[in-house]
Image (cartoon, grey):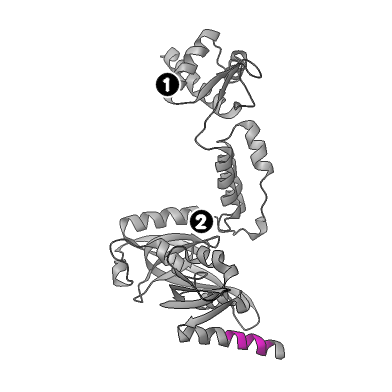
Amino acid sequence: MEEKKFKKLKLLYLYEIFISKSDPENILTVSDIADALAEYGITVERKSIYTDIECLREFGLDIIFTRSKKTGYYLKNRKFSLAELRILTDAVLSAKFITPDKTNHLLSKISEMASISERDVLLKLCATDFASKHTNESIYDTIEKLTYAINKKLKVSFKYSRNAFSDFSTVSIENKEFEVSPYTLILTNNHYYLVGNNSKYDNLMHVRLDRISNLKITESPARNFEEVCDYRGNFDANDYCKKLFNMFSGTLVNIKIKCDNSLVDVVLDRFSDDISLKTAGTNHFRAETSAVLSNGLVSWIMQYGNKVEVLEPQELKQMVIKQANDIIELYRK
């Protein structure tokens, strides 16, 4: 029994050695492998190493034998390339909803998928402003519970916190209790949002996960999303996200805007494929799409100054005019 256990552990440790210590720049000789196994308390004969390497190859590891720099073996292809690990690392670093402690924990896990030499490269390239990270350490628990509730179609209750002026001079935390039918989770603008229905109303709402606390899954069945929105069959999270600007709620309307030609990429990036573009003279084009009528949409339009003109609807045009006039009036004072 001990011999069988020894053989199984030897293969597992050998797997770990190739994952962590070998790559095209770090070739492992048979002696290197034997020494590495010895660190785990396992003494082996050279012949058994060749047999074990063949077992790992049959299992699917892309172990290459080479005589280039030195005669030995290395793991060529991994589940994640260094570029893919860099993308994952940067995504974790830029996600504000992940706390500093959990960020470091995740980075450590990601780096373990690279070889030791690649880990150094990966971590040296990392840089982030941890001061911009949120401090809600229950974010993982919140995500897990919401995912379960969405899957089981159950309502959730939670406390929601946000900053507010308490006496017109002091900023304090304002807490509200909600009971919500959860439909989906959306990651946008470096924040995680829950989209659902507040039991008191007949529409959709969204709240930031990092502001949620005391989340509980109830035994009450969630309200069908078809009762509170136009989606049928499946809740289209991508469509919902694209039509919102900076996660402001509002009424969905058809919009027409006239833009400077220099903004083609900007407009296409913002609205993706759900937009119609037509030339409007030499230097401009017209864009038609649908979006939520909100302050977020107004802010997006105004950031481009006189390079974007609202053609329709009239209500949106008036909102932009009002915002412009308010700014002018503010500076006149």
Q: Residue 19: horizontal and vertical position, in percent?
A: 55, 28
Instruction: Please state which of the two labelled residues, at mark 1 or mark 2, is closer to the viewer.
Output: 1
Q: In this view, does 85 lie to the left or right of 182?
A: right
> Disc 1 to disc 2, how far (Cα)?
40 Å
Callout 1 secondary element: helix
Specify the label residue 58 is tagged with: 1
Q: Is residue 190 above or below residue 314?
A: above
Q: What stretch is highlighted in magenta?
A: 323-330
Q: Residue 209: horizontal and vertical position, in percent?
A: 49, 62
Q: Residue at x 59, y 41 (%)?
A: 108
Q: Main secondary structure of the magenta part?
A: helix
Q: What residue type is labelled 2?
A: Ile
Q: Earlier in the sequence, mark 1 or mark 2?
A: 1
Magenta span has 231?
no
On the rendered image, what quadrant is the C terminus found in?
Answer: bottom right
Residue beneath disc 2: 139
Q: Is residue 60 above or below residue 123?
A: above
Q: Residue 123: horizontal and vertical position, in percent?
A: 66, 42
Q: Residue at x 69, y 42 (%)?
A: 124
Residue 158 visible at all: no
